[in-house]
Amino acid sequence: MSRQGLRIREVFRFQPAEGGLYPAMLQASRHTVLHYTGSQSDEGGVHAVIRQLACNPRARGLLGVNREYVTEKMPRLHAWRGPSVADETIGPGNILNTCRVAWRVRRWLRHAPHRIFHGHTRAGLLVALWLHLLGQRRVVASVHCYGRQSWFYRLATEWLGPRLLWLSPAMKRHYGLADRSWSGCMPNGVTAPLPGEMRRGPGDVLRLGGAGALVAWKRWDLVLAALARLPVAAKVRFIHIGGALDTPESRACERELHALTAKLGLEDRVEWRGWQRSSAELLREVDAVVVPSDGEPFSMIALEALFAGVPVVATRGGGPEDFVLDGVNGWLVPQGDVAALAGRIASLQQPAAWTGLRVMPDHLRKFSMNETLAARWTEIYSSL
């Protein structure tokens, strides 16, 4: 392996910066990073991740999107608008479209040596691969999803090597990689300070929160089914922020969830608030956050909740299993198990369920943008 390749592999190991300080050399560095998604809107967790990355004072962030892009979330990022692509599609048509994007990005990269391309979606990974084939090395890509085309991601690993990043060991297990450690992983992070303490249980009403798109694999129907199993007298509410994506499947899922809410007689327990600019209000209001997905890649709302001192109820087998510690800062339940989820929710109405919760600052620090991840991203961008 070349010296440069060894240098990159050293940088990509998961190690917090000592004392949370940046090396003096890196403090002086300044990169312009094109965080490319190819999206038409800022909905979804990937854009929440990019907004956190853009807070790094040592890397100026641009958001790479389609020409039709519309933004509502805060803070708003300067947009780099390219040819239209399908942001979460791998196929012949999108391969050609992302090639056109790559040629434009290649010209953009050549204008200044401090410019970096960072792909975040399936389209972003395709553009990164095209740039690699075009001889560009100031390229990195993050995998945020559990895709069905494992062969494609393994091929991308061979081509990009350590410049292809995984969110956590759970994602490496999903794609069948031999190395299932934190090496080569860059988790999502938040800029919030570490919390002083965890929530200590509900008042008169247990308030549960959820956030994310209304899509089938998020399994919001499990939450409804679990609530329907509770006694009529149980004082539990579920508040959800998020909505349908601009796809027929997601819009159908939204209709089905609203219909199921009415069918199960849960109108007084469930509130669908739609898309919000921030999760801050929800996290101030709820006692715990629920992540019921089948194979959740990471879950930004779960991480944001832990940094707000809000415990998380999440399913096993996905990214939250790498940072939600059962009985310590939340609880883990089997995927698709309505009875287990209902039982956990019922237990949270009792004060005893909350007594063992604690913040675990050394554990959370690994996911802090201010104390750990910003310095690591600066090192990674500098190594390119």
Image: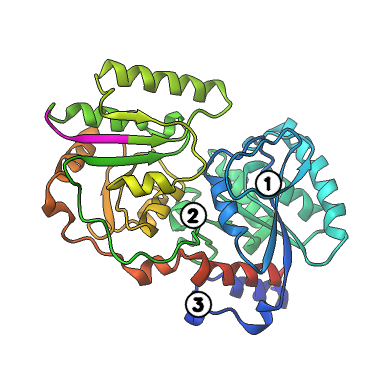
Label number found at residue 305: none
Q: Earlier in the sequence, mark 1 or mark 2?
A: 1
Q: Is there CB contact under 8 Å for labels 1 and 2?
A: no
Marks 1 and 2, how far apart at CA: 19 Å
Pointer 2 residue: 172
Q: Locate the N terminus and report the quarter of the image it occupies.
A: bottom right
Question: Residue at the location (58% across, 26% down)?
Answer: 246
Specify whether 23 is left or right of 222.
Answer: right
The image shows residue 227, relative to residue 332, as above or below, that is above
Tally of marks = 3
Q: Return the residue nearer the eye: 253 or 169.
A: 253
Question: What kind of element bears circle 2?
Answer: helix
Query: Is residue 198 found left or right of 378 in the rendered image?
Result: left
Q: Which residues are magenta?
A: 233-238
Of the residues under marks 2 and 3, which one precedes in the sequence?
Answer: 3
| Alpha carbons under labels 2 and 3: distance apart | 27 Å
- Which residue is identified by label 1? 124
